[in-house]
Amino acid sequence: MGAREAREDVTVEVREQHRTPLWRNATFLKWLAQLGVLAAVVALFAVLGAQALKNFNQSGISFGWKWLSDPPGISIREGIDTLPDSGVRAIVVGMVNTLRVGVSGILAATILGTLIGIGRLSKNWIVNKLSTVYVESIRNVPLLLQIFFWQALAITLPSLTEADVGTYWFKASNKGFALAWVRTDGGFWPWLLFVLVGLAVARRVFVRRLAHMEATGEETHPILTAIGVVVAFAVVGWFAWPLLRPLAGLWHGLASLFRALPPIVYPAVVALAAVVGAAWWIRSFFESRRTPAGFGKLTDDDWFRVVFAVVAGLAVAAVAFVVGGFELLTPAGDRRTIAELVGIGIANVLDWFGRAFEVTDGTPLVGTRPRVEVRGAGFVNFSTDGIVMSVPFFAVWTGVTLYTASFIAEIVRGGILAVPKGQTEASMALGFRRSQYLRLVILPQAFRIILPPMGNQYLNLMKNTSLGIAVAFPEIIAVGTTILNQTGQSLPVVLVWMGFFLSLSLGISAIVNYYNRKMKIKER
Amino acid sequence: MTSEPMAREDTPQERVLGEDIIICENVKKWFGDFQALKGVSTRVREREVVVIIGPSGSGKSTFIRCLNRLEAHQEGTIIIDGIELTNDLKNIEKIRSEVGMVFQQFNLFPHLTVLDNITLAPIWVRKMPKDEAEALAMQLLERVGIPEQANKYPGQLSGGQQQRVAIARSLAMKPKIMLFDEPTSALDPEMIKEVLDVMKELAASGMTMLVVTHEMGFAREVADRVLFFDYGTIVEEGTPEHFFTNPQHERTKLFLSQIL
């Protein structure tokens, strides 16, 4: 009756009077804000950059990248190369040292932290209290202090004297900890190829065996079979690796192919990847907005993302060509563009593989034992045999590993506690054994909760390795600082540091996010 | 959408009760100082449907949780299908695979699809081949009336549907006895019926059932026997008819007057 008519009246009224001014239009304002922020960011960087250039010009320091090719004139205490012949080489030594501590630290901290986290939930009183004491004491002391503590502890170990000269399986001293190890020898790379193929085959075998077991209930031992396949390939490869010698020609052929390619190809490939990537992203974005009824209405935010993807793709493509065209001075004294250098680099790596496959004698791996020897008058030290964990490495590695493990323990504990008790009860009522329901029900759910904060801890550990500079561990910050002091090239060195840690962090984030998305529980 | 579970009109009297399958003698249980069970003795026969009622904190849930060792009783004897429940892990494993349980909060595994929820235990505990387990799961989903939900995740279902999946998951282990711990208490009123209908059908098919519930209609219609728990003991027991028309004990009368 009356209500219905009244509503129609109102609609008509609104229609007649409607005309929104621009400053009240939510759509317009939103676009203005988005583009405004983008413009402000670009402007800020432009202003800062211009100011920095002006300051540098006034101060008389000319920044550049020549120090990358110059001999740095420094020696590095430990690493893949102790007397690097170029700045790049020195930086790479530092990066490898950082990665050595970081990656092995992440592995060790994850294992230790998980064990302690489970220990804190243990019904065994002693295990429980010990774990609690560990977590509370370690995470409440500054990391730098802990690194100094481990260094001080290691330095109190006995020093090496002439009485110690000899060969050992393990030897601790104030020069570090030496351990028997294996090193690669002739035939390693062809043998590695055998092992990699074995891993790929083992993966297939594992998947098929598992499927067979699930389908028929027959016990097929998928893990044991897969390990057997890898071992078989490794053993066969150990003797058969010289047969791969003809592959050397293939590597050299590929190398000459890369040498023959015009350098423009490399930036073109990057640009193509950027454009195709942007197009692919936009396509999948539209797909994701598709409903059974057809394409849903795209919001302004959606359109902004599409515009941004197009701009970003084109920008990366343009930058690739610009950077590819930069000229650098090589150690040999000639000027080459970055695109040319990329091609030469790839070809060199391929040639190097080719030479590795041409080797005819040796065994892929050789065991070596640490040796203490006299080096010059009254100077006793480890030889290069075995593997020596130096005191600085030990201090940094132990420090970051134990410190991060205490946080990981809390994350693991929280993750397991966050799985409702009913899940355990339901599993027990169905007759699962403890090991079964932990693996099939509890851990898959706890893992989802644990993963994102775990990624944060990995990032922290990586960044914390830079404290190594305090105990003279030559990681990238320490090496960079030395170069910086010698050359005065502060800005380029800092840019290299930032680029390194940024790409490392983004890499870890990408891996964690990938798993996070993959493991997400569907709720609606 | 969901097809109605077939509620057969069998009356409880048509089921022929068998031998004693659950024997409890003087079962006692403490939580710290608090004694939750103060000597419970009862016997349940094969194919019997026993409904347990009582105020909250009376020990009724604790009692049925003792029957599959989710809680360990401290004194007395519990014998299930001829096997005594003790600390012997092998006996516990055996009994758990014969006794199914349905919980108030469903406790489905949220990271697995409905189908995987149902097949997980048959595959890993019973070592049943996967195709066979999946065929069984589909058959059970048919029985509880939601075969079309097989590939969804628990979080995508309504409470009533989740509880029906939980019942199917227990049945997949082909249990001899089913325990229900307040199966409808967490459900919206319009979903209670769909779960109760499944339980009625199950009772009619001859399953031995112990049901803790506040659904007096279900007790009246389906139960062979009603146990009234208070302060950790069975205060009164009898047929539903006796129970709802002629309760003897003062506490029973008070309880019934409050909830009916």
Image (cartoon, coloured by chain):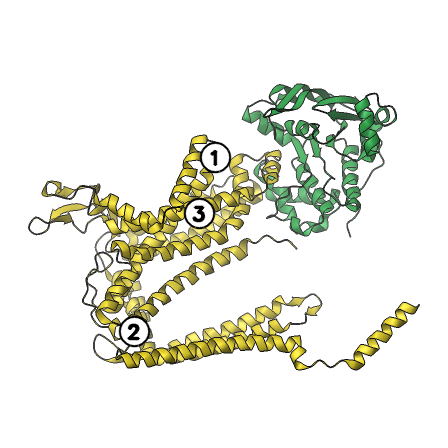
Element under label 3? helix
Q: Residues within 10 Å of mark 2 (few under 14, many from 20)?
A: some
Residue A482, quarter of picture? bottom left
Identity, as a three-letter code, of the amino acid under mark 3: Ile
Identity, as a three-letter code, of the amino acid under mark 2: Ile
Residue that appears at 65% across and 47% down: B114
Q: Tell me if B135 is positioned left or right of A186 in this view.
A: right
What percent of the width, then of the height, locates residue A207?
49, 49
Residue B21 seen in the current view:
yes
Q: Tell me if B102 is positioned left or right of A339 in this view.
A: right
Residue that appears at 78% across and 39% down: B196
Residue found at the far right of this picture: A1
Q: Earlier in the sequence, mark 1 or mark 3?
A: 1
Nearer to us of marks 2 and 3 is: 3
What is the spatial separation of the Cα atoms under label 1 and label 3, in whole angstroms?
A: 16 Å
Residue A348, quarter of picture? bottom left
Q: Are marks 1 and 3 in contact (CB under 8 Å)?
A: no
Q: Are marks 1 and 2 in contact (CB under 8 Å)?
A: no
What percent of the width, then of the height, locates residue B49?
77, 29
Q: Earlier in the sequence, mark 2 or mark 3?
A: 2
| Numbered mark located on residue A408 in the image | 3
Q: Colour of chain A?
A: yellow
What percent of the width, then of the height, locates residue A326?
33, 80
Taking A516 as reference, is B236 above or below it?
above
Q: Earlier in the sequence, mark 1 or mark 2?
A: 1
**Chain coloured green:** B
Residue that appears at 42% across and 42% down: A136
| Numbered mark located on residue A344 in the image | 2
Quickly name the residue at label 1: A122
Element under label 2? helix
